[in-house]
Amino acid sequence: MNTSEAIRKRRSIRKYKEGVVIPRKDIETILEAAMMAPSARNTRPWEFVVVESREGKEKIMEIQPYTGMLKTASAAIIVCGLPEVQKEANCSEFWPEDCGAAIENILLQALELGYGTCWCGFYPVEDRVKALKEAFDLKSVPLAVVALGVPDEEPAARGYFDPEKVRYI
Ligand SMILES: Cc1cc2nc3c(=O)[nH]c(=O)nc-3n(C[C@H](O)[C@H](O)[C@H](O)COP(=O)(O)O)c2cc1C
């Protein structure tokens, strides 16, 4: 699958084949792709927590009401930002953008490996961030959770190109 196909085929997956254990090497390929993302001044202000246990996934579902797909997902990747890293580097606070780029790489790399994903938002919803930090003893800022698993649904690809949203100067 080339990049063009992956971008156009990707959909959020909310139903996964249950009981699948994702090989560690696939998780590492996906996280390596995440860490290949561009970042402001190459500060790479991110870290990742891979939650595979049922109890861990249940904790996330209790905190964020739109994460029900974790019931069947094999794993939940918590993507965390490190604002301090950018502060120390005297870099403006671009960490949410940097983490967003890392997340998109996760979605596309996972798709190429045959997995489905769903991006679930946390930051900047304060109560979600606080609760997730407490639940997993995180020192960094959880920006999002990405559900990961083998898809058990196949939503059709769709296109959104809207020339009205483009202005040439
Ligand atoms: C910042 C962000 C937060 C999102 N949060 C959730 C969420 O909490 N639960 C969910 O099911 N989908 C969530 N999504 C997925 C969007 O609903 C989805 O991307 C959008 O409806 C377009 O559908 P598609 O991903 O299939 O193209 C989120 C996406 C983004 C970018």
Image (cartoon, rainbow, N blue to C red):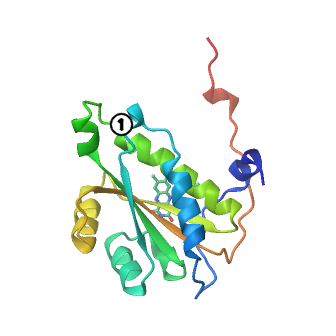
Q: Is residue 29 above or below residue 61?
A: above
The quarter of the picture where the C terminus appears is top right
Res. 161 image quadrant: top right
Res. 118 image quadrant: bottom right
**Who's the residue at 31% across and 72% down the image?**
63
The percent coordinates of residue 61 (x first, y second) are: 39, 76
Query: Image check: 28 left or right of 54?
Result: right
Which of 36 and 115 lies nearest the eye of the viewer? 36
Under mark 1, the amino acid is Phe
Q: Is residue 106 above or below residue 154?
A: above
Q: Which residue, as the protein is rendered here, is positioned at the far top?
A: 169
Q: Is residue 109 above or below residue 67?
A: above
Query: Image check: 133 left or right of 101?
Result: left
Quick check: can you spot residue 101? Answer: yes
Residue annotated with mark 1: 94
Q: Which residue, as the protein is rendered here, is positioned at the far front?
A: 25
The percent coordinates of residue 125 (x first, y second) are: 30, 55
The percent coordinates of residue 32 (x first, y second) are: 53, 56
